[in-house]
Structure formats: C-alpha cells, structure tokens
Amino acid sequence: MATSTAPGPRAASVPTVRRRRTWRDLPVAHQLRQSVGVQRGMLVVGLVLTGVFVLVALLAPLVAPYRWAQREADGRAFDTLHPPGGDHLLGTTQGGYDVLSRVLWGAQTALQTMVIAVVLSIFVGVALGLVSGYVGGWLDRVLVVVADAIYAFPTLLLAIVASIAISGGQSSKWGGIFAAAVSITVVFIPQYLRVIRAETVRIKAEAYVESAKVVGASTGRIMFRHVLRNATRTLPLIFTLNCSEALLTLAGLGFLGFGIEPNSGAEWGYDLNRAVGDVTSGVWWTGLFPGLAIVLAVLGVTLVGESLNDLADPRLRGRRSVTAASGTVAATSVVPGGTLDSAAGLEAPDDDADGGRDR
C-alpha cells in the first residue's frame, strides 16, 4: 500500500538585514580601532597635530590678533624685535611684524599650497597611470621613461625653476602658492602614475574585466567603472605622505628667497630666513616659532601617513593577534610524553624512563 507524504511547510526565508554604517566605520575611526600599542600612539599624536594645523589654518582670520603684514595698531607702530609678552605674545620681528600673527597666517598658506599640489598630482597622475596601464604599447613605454627621468631632478631644484618661470620673479601670494604647487605636482605625478599603472595592469587581467569586454562594454566604461574604482585603494597612503613633502618644499622655497614676500602673505620659510641674522644678536623668538610650526605640521602629517601605511600591511596590523595566538598554541601544544601545561608534566616521563632503564 502506497503512502503519500504530505509536503511540509516551506522554510521561511530570512531577510538579510544590512548593518547601518556608523561613525565607527569612517576611515579614520576604523584605522584607529585597528591600531595597537605604539602604533596607536603614533596615529593619535599625528591626528591631533594635523587637526590643530588644519583648524588653525581655517580659523586664522578669526584667531590671529593682526593681519600678516600689519605693523601698527591704533595709529601706533609696533616696536621692532619686541620680546614675547604684552600685546605681542610671541614678540615682533626686525620688520615690526607680529610673530604670532604671521605663524597663524602661515598655516593657511601652507594648507592652501599642500591641497592644490596634491590634488593636481592625483588628477594628472591617476589619469596618466590609468591610460598607461590599460592601453600599453609604445605609449606606456614613453610615459614610464619620462616618469623615471623626472626622478633624476631634485625636488627643490624643480621648485625653484618653476617658481621663476610661473611667477616671473614676482612674489605675490597666489603666484608663490601656485608656483610651489605646480613644482610639487611635477615631482609627485610619477609616483601616482606608477602606482595606478601597476594596479591597472593587474586588474585588467581579472575575470570581471574580461566579462565586461565580452558583453560589449566600451573602453571608457571599463576603464572608469571597473578598473579605476579598484585601482585607487592605496591613494590615501600616498596622499598623506606627500603632504609633508609639500610643506617642506614650500618652506625651502621661502627660505631660499623664492617664496612669498611678507606684504603679500605669511610664509614660514621666509620668516625663518629673515630670522637667521637675529640669532647672533640673541633674538631667539623670531626664528623659534616659525621653525617649530614647520616641525610640528610636518611631524603630524608624517605620523598619520606612516601609521596608515603600517595598518595597510597585514604583517604589522596583525602582530597583536599573532602574539596572542602563539601564546595560546604554546600553552596547549602536545609533545611526546605530555603537554606544555606544567613543568611537572615534562619531567614525569623522563623519570619513568630513567627508572625503567635502572631496573
């Protein structure tokens, strides 16, 4: 007799709930949660210094007591080489400028130059690297040779030449910023070109790129929709490391006299140059504070970049978990004759063996 089995109830499908993104998923917060030990300390110090630098640059018009070229207030001229204190917390320079005001306004000039230089470098370098890696052929060889040739020129030498060629010897604020930014851009472009080119060469051989070609996707769609989106993951690391070099290049131009004049804008390198002669006279405040601003700004950006670079390396990122795992394995490992749980467990088999041989 055949028996029929009634079909059971269909299993209810469990809807997939997508987790909402919170502030913990932001890039900086996520990297901070991943860091451990000294690595976390470096990242925190770098973020604090960089945050203070950016805030000072943005709020310079509000927090600076005077304009960068102001030498008098209420109809009274400032004293030259006035020591720190009173109306001038950080003193005044030989030209009668307030040191605190020029340090604060100099942060704004440094931030503007850094942003323009790095953004231009990213756009031009990524575009050339994408075309070089995807198209290949003679164009790829030419771009690689040109990129290698640019590395032969010192950064500061290119900056000096570009500053003279672009600004025409005039040291206006935006002329000096643009000259420094373009010179830095020329040096940074090969770095982005090489990184994006290497990623593009690897990605264009992936299966999903070949599938896009099969279904008839255009070359531009493949390059920008499939290749570019997966080739720019390492750009934030290069971005942070290049920002510190941009600050140093701008300071070098100002120190050598190719920067911005004091009546056109505040620039730390120029102020440091003018303070060289004051040191022999015992006037320390005109050079200490601009130099300290350069050191702290570069240090903050560098610490952030180096910490992000370490966190991107799986070998360095997972060193805490590896250490913990190795300790667990050592405590539970099995060896001939016993375990590593206690010293007695290791000695007992040896005693038994010796006793057996004696008998």
Image (cartoon, rainbow, N blue to C red):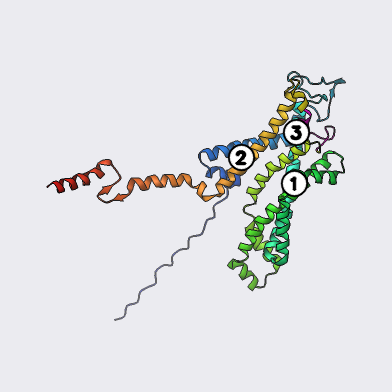
Secondary structure of the residue carrying tag 2 is helix
Say which of 30 and 196 sits in front: 196
* Dot 2 alpha-carbon crowd within 10 angstroms: few under 14, some 14 to 19, many 20 or more: many
The CA span between labels 3 and 1 is 17 Å
> From this viewpoint, is residue 24 visible?
no
User: Which residue sits at x=85%, y=23%?
Assistant: 72
Q: Which residue is mark 2?
A: 303
The CA span between labels 1 and 2 is 21 Å
Q: Residue furthest front?
A: 152
| Label disc, if present, on residue 262 of the rendered structure | none
Q: Is residue 15 left or right of residue 189?
A: left
Q: Is residue 329 left or right of residue 170?
A: left
Say which of 9 and 96 sits in front: 96
Q: Which is nearer the N-term, disc 1 or disc 2? A: 1
Residue 206 image position (x, y, % from top left): 59, 66
The CA span between labels 2 and 3 is 21 Å
Name the amino acid, label 1: Ile
User: Which residue sits at x=46%, y=44%?
Assistant: 320
Up the image or down, 319 lies above or below 279; here it is: below
Up the image or down, 1 lies above or below 230; here it is: below
- Look at the image and tell me in which quarter the N terminus lies: bottom left
Which contiguous range is marked in magenta? Answer: 259-275
Residue 267 image position (x, y, % from top left): 77, 34
Q: Which residue is mark 1?
A: 184
Name the amino acid, label 2: Leu
Q: Which is nearer the N-term, disc 2 or disc 3? A: 3
Q: Is residue 183 magenta?
A: no
Residue 18 image position (x, y, % from top left): 54, 55
Q: Which is nearer the N-term, disc 3 or disc 1? A: 1
